[in-house]
């Protein structure tokens, strides 16, 4: 049977999940994702030569022609989820050269019709420093989170947050665990839209393009 | 957002690609973009010849961007002050002409990134003008 007549399924048995599963994406297609920023000859494509899981990953690269500091590219997706839940948001990523990246931002925003729940993590590879955004949406260093990432290796990052109490739970980077349970997340009053918005992006640190592969994206309830 | 599948997929994205419209007196060039693999299904373009009384004979040169792979010629000459439409299809048939339309066989082709298809025109004149080549393409991402 040729592949176009084969239904895609997700094999959950290999996916570590502690609670009800919400969404898993192996980047075998890009149908649910949208490019964020990225101008000129920036690349936002699937790459069949590199994958953490299955056959492909998402390849992001800022523009090469006219590359400048703070060039940006990312990916985003909308899901439909209410009410607020305890969530674990995780994905694998790698870069051939993290030193070209000024920062990587990853966050999700739940608009539940009343509030905007907005847990955010930012990584500065050249410091290296991991940060979270506090209840005023201001970046704060995570204590002892000076964890560098290795070029060309797949790294797994997990952001765990309780959108009911608007508190972070933890940040996990590879095998490192950082307890964030003392910190509240930004949750201003918002309008009527109701959805879960997922976002990953990166900025260049200089006039060279930066690159990143993303694979094995997962959101599940805790 | 239009997204071509990667080379893991059996079928690529089908679309009609408009190659650059060459200036008068210049050959037409079709180029496979970076990180792409193209299967060419058909090519169509016009050639308008100027008043210079000489027969033009048209062919196509297939290249990987630096090395010629092969040439494809057809046997219908075009004289001065005519407009002819050349159409290449991946069907095995002998070239034939109907009115202003010239039909030519095209072998099945899958071309890697940076490959080119260039017209080659014997006796091309400064006033001869190729129109925009329209290429029916099946495209994959091939990094």
Image: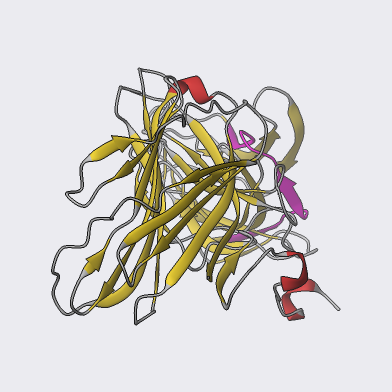
Is residue A156 shown left or right of residue B110? left
Q: Position of residue A83 (x, y in %)?
A: 34, 82
Q: Is residue A138 magenta?
A: no
Q: Position of residue B11 (x, y in %)?
A: 69, 65
Q: Position of residue A170 (x, y in %)?
A: 47, 51
Q: Position of residue B126 (x, y in %)?
A: 39, 27
Q: Nearer the viewer, residue B53 or B132?
A: B132
Q: Nearer the viewer, residue A138 or A151?
A: A138
**Which residue of the protein is positioned furthest toward the front in this rendering?**
A182
- Height in image: A6 above or below A25? below
Q: Residue at x 25, y 47 (%)?
A: A134
Q: Residue at x 34, y 37 (%)?
A: A72
Q: What stretch of residues is rendered in magenta?
A: B102-121
- Magenta stretch: helix, strand or loop mostly: strand
Q: Is residue B112 magenta?
A: yes
Q: Quadrant of the N terminus of chain A?
A: bottom right
Q: Nearer the viewer, residue A63 or A176?
A: A176
**Which residue of the protein is positioned furthest toward the right in this rendering?**
A1
Q: Residue at x 16, y 80 (%)?
A: A192
Q: Nearer the viewer, residue A133 or A154?
A: A133
Is residue B96 shown left or right of residue A170? right
- Quarter of the image holding residue A173? top right
- Height in image: A181 above or below A178? below
- Res. A174 visible in picture: no
Is residue B64 shown left or right of residue A196? right
Is residue A41 shown left or right of residue A118? right
């Amino acid at each position: 049977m040729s592949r176009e007549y084969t239904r895609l399924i997700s094999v959950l048995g290999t996916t570590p999940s502690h609670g009800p599963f919400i969404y898993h994406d192996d980047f075998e297609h890009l149908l649910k994702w949208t490019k964020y920023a990225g101008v000129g000859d920036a690349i936002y494509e699937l790459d069949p030569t590199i994958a953490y899981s299955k056959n492909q990953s998402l390849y992001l690269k800022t523009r090469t022609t006219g590359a400048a500091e703070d060039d940006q590219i990312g990916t985003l997706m909308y899901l439909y989820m209410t009410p607020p839940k305890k969530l674990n948001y995780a994905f694998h990523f790698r870069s051939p050269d993290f030193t070209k990246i000024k920062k990587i931002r990853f966050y999700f925003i739940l608009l539940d019709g009343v509030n905007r729940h907005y847990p955010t993590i930012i990584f500065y590879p050249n410091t290296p420093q991991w940060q979270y955004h506090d209840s005023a949406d201001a970046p704060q260093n995570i204590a002892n989170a000076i964890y560098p990432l290795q070029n060309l290796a797949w790294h797994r990052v997990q952001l765990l947050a309780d959108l009911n109490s608007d508190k972070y739970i933890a940040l996990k980077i590879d095998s490192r665990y950082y307890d964030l349970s003392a910190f509240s997340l930004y949750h201003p009053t918002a309008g009527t839209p109701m959805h879960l918005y997922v976002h990953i992006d990166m900025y260049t640190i200089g006039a060279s393009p930066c690159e990143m592969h993303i694979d094995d994206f997962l959101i599940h309830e805790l | 957002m239009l997204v071509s599948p990667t080379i893991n997929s059996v079928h690529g994205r089908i679309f009609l690609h408009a190659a650059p419209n060459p200036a008068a007196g210049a050959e037409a060039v079709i180029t496979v973009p970076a990180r792409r693999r193209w299967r060419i299904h058909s090519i169509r373009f016009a050639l308008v010849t100027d008043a210079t009384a000489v027969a033009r004979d048209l062919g196509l040169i297939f290249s990987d961007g630096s090395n010629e792979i092969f040439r494809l010629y057809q046997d219908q000459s075009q004289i001065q002050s005519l407009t002819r439409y050349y159409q290449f299809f991946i069907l095995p048939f002998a070239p034939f002409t109907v009115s202003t339309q010239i039909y030519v066989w095209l072998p099945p082709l899958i071309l890697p990134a940076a490959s080119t298809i260039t017209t080659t025109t014997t006796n091309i004149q400064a006033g001869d003008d190729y129109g925009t080549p329209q290429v029916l393409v099946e495209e994959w991402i091939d990094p």
